[in-house]
Structures are given as structure tokens and as C-alpha cells.
Amino acid sequence: MIEKADQQMTNPQFAGMHLSCCIWAMEGHSENPVAALIEAGYRYMDIRATDFRDIDARPALSVSSVGLSFGIPDGHSLDDSDMERSIETGRHVRNALEHAGWCQVTSAYVVPGFDTSSNAVARFAGQLVHLAEQASEHDIKICVEHFPGRGLPTVAATLSLLRDIGHPNLYLLLDTGHTQISGEDPAQAVNDAGDRLGYV
């Protein structure tokens, strides 16, 4: 069960932070996930690019971050080698970014594809540059989530790519569960990321 978020927020160690819950964590547990999160004391939630698409109906909770990779058409990816599919994927992510702007978030994130080859990672990097530029117009940070089993399986690999790209609007999304899988120390990851840490 979700611990009372408002109780967490009164703890001095959480000063200056806000806690958010992924809306999809409530799927199958509540007919009204937003109401359930409000009842649990949350003031923020993370959503997918496919959530709350009715622009006339704002969600009752503030949105903390938007997962832009959600809803990419089947068979497509941000590291796609097929030009036509790559263009379609880019269009989807741009639309997702517009949705993130409507949600008034300050950060959004993407995940790498399953292709671990250097060519695929390079294609992913190219998409990141375009996305980071577009997101700058909305004052949204673009974060990249390290994801075991994908093209950027570790914090170290993700930070290395971000530094190689060198774009000022690209950051790390730190997933502490993923660091457990990859055997990395989350505290060290925070130190290593420095000002490139965009979201946890």
C-alpha cells in the first residue's frame, strides 16, 4: 500500500523535495487513480504521454513529469534505423512534448531502445538533440532513463552519452530500482551526475 505522502513531507529530510507517484502504479488497484493518490496525500503524479489527452480536462493533481516514450507505435523506437519509422517516432515524441507543456511540467523523460549497438545509441543521441532543443522552448528538461537490457543499461553509460552529446538541456533520470539491477550505488550515481541529475 502507498505510504501517506503528506507524512513523508513533514520529515525534515524531505525538505525542498516533492514526492510523486506514477499514475500507472495504481492501475488495477483503483477505479479512480488520481483520487486514490490524493487520498494517500500525494500532491504530484507522473504520467505517460498517453494519459489525460483531453486538453479540456486538467487532472486534479499537479503533474511532476511525463514519460514521452509511452505510446510510441509498435515496431518503432527512438533509435530506429528506418527513416520513415524514425520520422513517425519523432512526430509522436514532439506531440508528447506538447502534452508535457500543457501539463506545465519542468521535466520529461525518454528511455533508450533495445538495440545495444553503437549505431543505435548514436541514432538515439541524434533524436535526443532534437528533442532537447524543442523542449528548451517549453522550459522542460529532457531526462534520459538508464534501463538494464536496453541501449543505455547503466547510469555510467547514460552519463557518458550525455557528456559526449554536451547539450545543456539533457539530464539523467535516476531510477534507483534500475541501479539495484545494474549493481550501481545510487548515492555514487547522484555524485557522478552532479548538475546533470534531472529527476529521481
Image: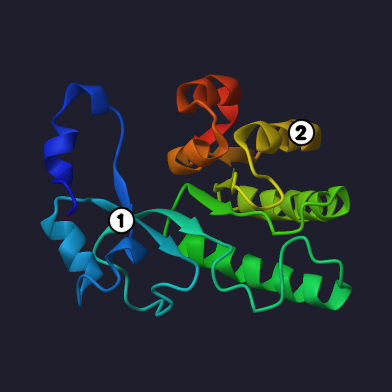
* Residue 70 vertical position relative to residue 117 in the rendered view, above or below: below
Neighbor class of circle 1 (other Cα within 10 Å; few <14, some 14-19, many 20+) is some
Percent position (x, y) of residue 34? 23, 66
Query: What residue does disc 2 label?
Result: 166
Residue 91 found in image quarter: bottom right
Amino acid at dot 1: Ser
Q: Nearer the viewer, residue 147 or 92?
A: 147
Neighbor class of circle 2 (other Cα within 10 Å; few <14, some 14-19, many 20+) is few
**From this viewpoint, is residue 183 visible?**
yes
Residue 77 found in image quarter: bottom right
User: Judging from the image, what secondary structure is the residue with disc 2 in?
Assistant: loop
Give the position of the C terminus as an image quadrant: top left
Amino acid at dot 2: Gly
> Does the residue at mark 2 contact the one at mark 1 (Cβ under 8 Å)?
no
**In the figure, is residue 118 to the left or right of 35?**
right
**Alpha-carbon span between mark 2 and mark 1:** 31 Å
**In the figure, is residue 88 to the left or right of 60?**
right
Residue at 20 percent across and 74 percent down: it is 32
Percent position (x, y) of residue 99? 50, 67
* Residue 108 vertical position relative to residue 169 in the rendered view, above or below: below
Query: What residue does disc 1 label?
Result: 62
**From this viewpoint, is residue 174 visible?**
no
Q: Nearer the viewer, residue 45 or 188?
A: 188
Which label's residue is closer to the chain start, 2 or 1? 1
User: Judging from the image, what secondary structure is the residue with disc 1 in?
Assistant: strand
**In the figure, is residue 197 to the left or right of 85?**
left
Residue 168 found in image quarter: top right
Residue at 20 percent across and 72 percent down: it is 30
